[in-house]
Amino acid sequence: MGPEIDTALKIQNLDRRIFELRREIASLPKHIAEIEKQLEAHERRLELDRANLAANEKERRKREEEINGFEGKISRLKGQMLDARTNDQYRAFQHEISFGEQGISKAEDRILELMEESESLGEAVSNAEATLKSEKVEVEAESEQARQRTASDKEELAARLAEREELAKKLSPPVLAAYEYVRKRYGSQVLAEATSGKCSACNIALRPQYFQELRHAKVPMRCESCGRLLYYHAPVDVEAEQSST
């Protein structure tokens, strides 16, 4: 395997890492935006619970005022009953008093319902406040980690790009041009090893003559099927290496 093939493989490994870094750099802000969006939804839910609790308390005060109004009216009516001169007047007072008492009963029933609702709403607000406080701490921590990770990724990306640029200078113009052409088509899977007379990428059998040429080539050759850059790596004779040691 020639030096240009070795260099091209190193560039391919760098390209894969560069791709991963760029993808992570792009994904981190999206991830933070998603968790912040969830946090905003929980904040809106908390505000709704608070509004419902406030509405509950407002209606309860209103019902209590109604009871006070009915009680005052009943007290006045009872005083006026003493001055009733006819049975019709007396019954009219009794009817008004009964109407007021019914109003008090309905208001008291509604207050009991509101008190039960208030208990569950208050509990929901308390739980939501505690959860939201914890979530804010977690979101801030994740955001800080994302900022640090992004800074680290950008620093590594700059180093990898500089390293790639230096390695690319070691490739001959034809090989570099072929590499970049294939990379635009296949991304980071530019080179493929020829194994068992096939391209390991597309798994298409190579022509015998072409395979023979590839075995002795010092530079990568284009696969006649998929167009990737093929190289041949001679198998290592383990027994020969062991005997030599």
Image: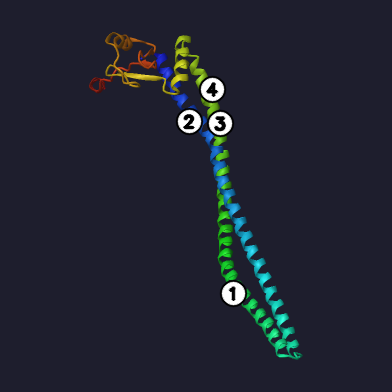
How would you rate the neighbour count of disc 1 (Cα within 10 Å): few for under 14, some for 14-19, many for 20 or more?
few
Q: Secondary structure at mark 1?
A: helix
Query: Which of the labelled discs sits on residue 20, or is there none?
Result: 2
In front: label 2 or label 4: 2
Amino acid bearing label 4: Ala
Q: Residue at x 41, y 23 (%)?
A: 189
Q: Quadrant of residue 155?
A: top right
C-alpha distance separating marks 1 and 2: 65 Å
Q: Secondary structure at mark 3?
A: helix
In front: label 4 or label 1: 1
| Mark 1 or mark 2, earlier in chain | 2
Q: Residue at x 59, y 58 (%)?
A: 129
Query: Which of the labelled discs sits on residue 199, or is there none?
Result: none
Query: Which of the labelled discs sits on residue 162, or is there none?
Result: 4
Q: Is residue 216 left or right of residue 160?
A: left
| Mark 3 or mark 4, earlier in chain | 3
Tell me the quarter of the image containing the C terminus.
top left
Which residue carries the number 3 mark? 154
C-alpha distance separating marks 3 and 4: 12 Å
Q: Secondary structure at mark 2?
A: helix
Which residue carries the number 1 mark? 109
